[in-house]
Amino acid sequence: MTALSELMDYDEVIEKFDPVLGLEVHVELHTNTKMFCGCANVFGGEPNTNTCPTCLGMPGALPVVNATAIESAIRIGLALNCEIAEWCRFARKNYFYPDMPKNFQTSQYDEPIAFNGWLDVTLDDGEILRVEIERAHMEEDTGKSLHVGGATGRIHGAEHSLLDYNRAGVPLIEIVTKMVPGTGRRAPEVARAYVTALRDLLKALDVSDVRMDQGSLRCDANVSLSPKTTGELGTRTETKNVNSLRSVERAVRFEMTRQAAVLESGGKVIQETRHFDESSGSTSSGRTKETAEDYRYFPEPDLVPIAPSREWVEELRGTLPELPWERRKRIQQEWNLTDEALRDLVNAGAMDLIAATVDAGAKPDEARSWWVSYLTQQANTRGVELADLPITPAQVAQVITLVNSGSLTNKMAREVVTGVLEGEGEPDEVVEKRGLKVVSDDSALEAAVDEALAAQPDVAQKIRDGKVQAAGAIVGAVMKATKGQADAARVREIVIARCS
Amino acid sequence: MIRQTAAELAAKIHRGETTSVEVTQAHLDRIAETDGKLNAFLHVDTEGALAQARKVDEDVAAGRTPASPLAGVPLALKDVLTQEGIPTTAGSKILEGWRPPYDATVTRKLKEAGIVILGKTNMDEFAMGSSTENSAYGPTANPWDLTRIPGGSGGGSSAALAAHQAPLAIGTDTGGSIRQPGAVTGTVGVKPTYGTVSRYGLIAFSSSLDQAGPCARTVLDAALLHEVIGGYDPMDSTSINAPLPPVVAATREGAQGDLSGVRVGVVTQFSGEGYQPGVLRSFEAAVSQLKELGAEIVEISCPSFDYALPAYYLIAPSEASSNLARFDAMRYGLRVGDDGNRSTEEVMSLTREAGFGPEVKRRIMIGTYALSAGYYDAYYGSAQKVRTLITREFEQAFTKVDVLVSPTTPTTAFKIGERTNDPVAMYKADLCTIPSNLAGNCGLSVPSGLSDEDGMPVGLQIMAPALQDHRMYRVAAAYEAARGPIGGASL
Ligand SMILES: [Zn+2]
């Protein structure tokens, strides 16, 4: 662990160095089946249940490429403004590791399916930065090792290890940026914004669950520092195990301050893999390799080259959905938002939720009001992201409909939403269970009004005498009697009708 | 009964003149009687074979059409193809005790065709060798002379045929492992066009070269078996989605004995130094015979074939070094040194040390080196260029001729132990067969009689372009008919 005293003050870092970023993102595709076999591609599941001879690396078993994965890879490439290879191959990346059944990973090496693209990234202040994409290539995921015993959960010190190959062979797309220089102070923010933009893009393409917490989106952050005095490129480190958007930002910032301190003290940054620790916000050295690993890449002889026809590529281009930035622009116009208002919605992660609520039938203003006020409050109380609240835009839209039809008051609607958040079921069910219903049956209300008038004859008389403001007391009594489920305005009308 | 061909046996079974159980039992008896001397089988599946035979007999008794023209005929399966529940070792200690959970596509097709699988045959470990001496389970002897090798890597399959333990066998050919054993045991061996017989379930040695194929004592039996095991398989991405060449029809046509209009090219590179004079004399006689049958004989020079052997010994070990990485003690097979204290890496290393034989280790090391950064272009890269060159030279040759011929292997079967300390001498046994593997073409070895020096069988190799397998069957069948019987093994 690096002590705080070994870090350089951030302002000083920026004064003395230019940070250079490089980001490698691995995305698990949510195809029905794995990359090279027919096993189900699902997260979780009893260990080693979604396996077959191929993904277990049994002798004699062979891979067959999942056509949907290639399709997804091409669509991702197109959405990232990449060129799509006319001809490319898979390659074997050879190294021994127990969670890799064949002891080689079927990947792509010097012939990626997509290359030379870019992604426009919106920063917190609305500024747009173009990040250049070097390549996007296909590969397969590894299994998982579970190290039992020992303090760290890492292989060293463990008593024994268990292997689960359910994830082995899950399709992955690795997206690699070119070097991103010149971001200065904003480097950590750029890193976060890039991963956010990429996540939103992949979500819009509907190719992945993009859940960083479940590992379906993983980011490795490469950071190096170039001294302002010389302008020479520095040695980079690669930080892994960055499991949230916030961690991307923190990890980059930490590495900058750590590397700066090393360089300042006359030391050298070691080219290595580092692990990010969520709780301390620091990175620590992974296993240092004395020599660079030689993966002995060569073209995968068990697979034939992929040569997507230009017609097919164009056909796939036609399937690209409205991309997040295009959508943002359209929504801004449709909802008549200022740049600032839009940015706040985007930053709060509310825009997609509001849009989905609108798609489910609500009006933009109503949808927006729910998500930015009551639901944001709920998310804050629960300490979760807005999107992770256990309520869907469709459910919010249902509640809004109930309010508009007069079945629920605003206060009751909030109670329904709370019920949904607490897992009581669909809005209808919550209404039922909690007995939340505007009493709109006039005869029932009339009876209640008559009862209240009889109980307070002096007030009744005042109303009959034309002192309409006295009706409030009767309305209050009726509301109390109906446990707030009556529509107060309607009650008032009845009271006045009865007394005239 | 065991002297009969598969076609004859099948006809008799289908006509009800004998039963598959009877035929199967006769071969099981023959195995029991002779295999102590031969060591052709690593595993004999008596019960499974008889059960399969009974099924065929039930079909015949019930008047149902046989599942295939070879239904009911027994077969020996090279131990490099998986068979569900049956021990499969690829001749290696590292897979000792492994029972595959699935059938190779070839195995499945054999079962569906009603062919009776007698058991798994011996082979050089992971098909690396030309003598079956590299098997972890001891060498197989040549039925013609028990002091000699039966060829390799599929020595078990060819020895089983020559010794009449089985009328049919399956081999796999990466650099000659079907054809060279065929030649030195006086049997027929065919390496089909790459991609026409599925590799699914074939334990990989060199993925871009491996090809399963039929082994038999006659060309017709090989052709019948070829049509059972061949065809497109979606489980093998390198499988060719095209109709299988009509090899049975071509064989029947060839057996008429007329080769007029067929242009036969004699590869000039495959003679001279290193070739046993008796082998060359047998080859020349065979070429004369083809001429008599009406073929036009042309000399063809393919200079790049001289580089086939070195290119092969870079490409095959490179792919093997990667293919064999999966044998790491984690999921199946041997595990050595797992005492609860050793690390995973140590257990992997100890297992591979104990589980692989010297030739396998040699090739893993060569391959690992050839693929290393800084050496890749010089070794693997250059070898691939040679491969392209050889493919082009084949293409050019096949514009001038329909088939190419050569001796299958430069010498007759050598003595057991004679070349074990000289790997390069051993490698030279595949000199004539390797080019077809590198080009992905087809090749066939048919017996051309016995060498006048040592009385051991000699093979005539016939090569054809990819997907033209029928051409070589036609020539082989015509030649076989004209040649007449070559006699049988002494065992
Ligand atoms: Zn699988």
Image: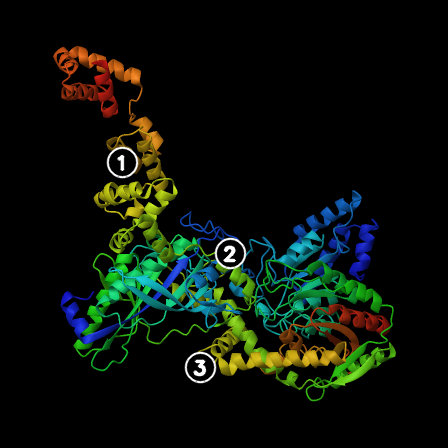
Depicted A338 relative to depicted A447: above or below: below
In the rendered image, residues at marks 2 and 3 fall on the same chain: no
Q: Quadrant of the N terminus of chain B?
A: bottom right
Q: Nearer the viewer, mark 1 or mark 3?
A: 1
Secondary element at image label 3: loop
Q: Which residue is mark 2?
A: A68
Residue behind mark 3: B374
Residue type, label 2: Thr
> Which residue type carries mark 3?
Gly
Q: Where B270 falls versus A382 (above or below)?
A: below
Tell me: residue B44, above or below residue A361. Answer: below
Where does the C terminus of chain B fall, quadrant-wise?
A: bottom right
In-image side of A85 versus A375 (left or right): right
Helix, strand or loop status at disc 1: helix
First-in-chain label (1 vs 2): 2
Question: Against A260, is A423 above or below?
Answer: above
